[in-house]
Image (cartoon, rainbow, N blue to C red):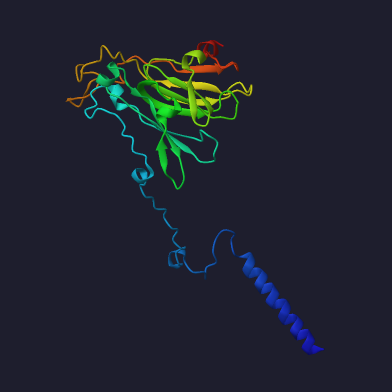
């Protein structure tokens, strides 16, 4: 009996000591006799992803048109890429936005975009001409969406001097519906985004514009000490000193046309 009592007392004492020791460990802090964090083994290093430029091998060879000296602010802009599955084959195709130069733009400009269709094994084919993407200008940006809910993704291209809307007819064939839809815009359009701002089930179009630039009356390089010089060095003029242009919001009317409503919304 005494032996059993002694064992019971020993067990009770051991339990109490264990409980007291555990209670003294502050949550979130290691006990005093734990290994300092600085001495602990570091976690296993995570592998860093590596990338390989396969553009040439894949057939993505279009050269972006741009002047090397960048004497005017319009020459400092442009460039961009969009992704689209233009024939619903489950593979993403690539849209490359093309630039231009002041001289080339004055002579009619360049194709605003190049469309590459993804074939097998990550190989791409330039189908711009056969796709009907023929509008020329000075490309700046691109946005993709199915604006008429027909299950095919359409393309909107922004650019200096005018934008373009291409309606997808299927099998990567497009129709230029810019004028019919009323989304040519004009000015110095840089970016665009699709979104259903009024939640009527039809995506609307927002277009961001930059500054006003007159291609026939360009500000001379470094001619204004306030806006065209930096620490005594001659630089291109702008954006400071150039008048800004308003952004645009085109409401999708559901019949293939859009209405520019930014002024109406701002006045509400």
Q: In this rendering, would 62 be left or right of 232?
A: right
Which residue is nearer to you in this view: 2 or 261? 261
User: At x 21% / y 28%, what residue is drawn?
Assistant: 69
Where residue 217 appears, as percent x and y from the top left, is: 25, 11
Q: Position of residue 134 (x, y in %)?
A: 40, 23
Quarter holding the N terminus is bottom right
Q: Quadrant of residue 135?
A: top left
Up-down relation of residue 138 to residue 92 (above or below): above
Number of marks present in the image shown: 0
Q: Position of residue 201 (x, y in %)?
A: 63, 24
Q: Where is residue 164, by image quadrant?
A: top left
Residue at the location (55% across, 66% down)? Answer: 31
Which residue is pictured at 21% across the width and 24% down the height?
235
* 169 relative to 251, above or below: below
Q: Residue at x 63, y 23 (%)?
A: 199
Q: Which of the image's four quarters has the C terminus?
A: top right
Counting from the top left corner in percent of width and height, residue 197 is at: 58, 22
Q: Quadrant of residue 105?
A: top left
Residue in front for this viewpoint, 46 or 25: 46
Q: Residue furthest right?
A: 1
Question: Looking at the image, which is closer to me, 64 or 6?
Answer: 64
């Amino acid at each position: 009996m005494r032996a059993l009592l002694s064992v019971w007392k020993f067990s009770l004492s051991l339990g109490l000591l264990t409980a007291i020791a555990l209670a003294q460990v502050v949550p979130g802090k290691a006990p005093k006799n734990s290994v300092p964090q600085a001495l602990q083994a570091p976690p296993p290093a995570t592998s860093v992803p590596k990338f390989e430029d396969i553009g040439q091998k894949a057939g993505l060879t279009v050269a972006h048109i741009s002047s090397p000296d960048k004497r005017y602010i319009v020459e400092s802009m442009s460039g961009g890429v969009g992704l689209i599955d233009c024939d619903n084959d489950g593979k993403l195709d690539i849209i490359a936005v093309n630039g231009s130069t002041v001289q080339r733009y004055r002579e009619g400009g360049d194709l605003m975009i190049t469309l590459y269709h993804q074939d097998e094994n990550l190989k791409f084919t330039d189908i711009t001409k056969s796709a009907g993407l023929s509008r020329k200008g000075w490309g700046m940006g691109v946005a993709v969406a199915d604006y008429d809910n027909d299950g095919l993704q359409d393309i909107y291209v922004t650019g200096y001097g005018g934008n373009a809307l291409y309606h997808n007819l299927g099998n990567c064939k497009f129709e230029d519906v810019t004028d019919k839809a009323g989304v040519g815009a004009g000015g110095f359009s840089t970016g665009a985004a699709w979104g259903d701002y009024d939640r009527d089930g039809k995506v609307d179009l927002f277009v961001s514009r930059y500054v006003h630039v007159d291609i026939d009356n360009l500000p001379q390089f470094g001619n204004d000490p306030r806006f065209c010089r930096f620490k005594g060095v001659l630089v291109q003029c702008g954006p400071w000193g150039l008048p800004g242009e308003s952004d645009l919001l085109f409401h999708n009317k559901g019949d293939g046309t859009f209405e520019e409503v930014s002024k109406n919304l701002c006045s509400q």
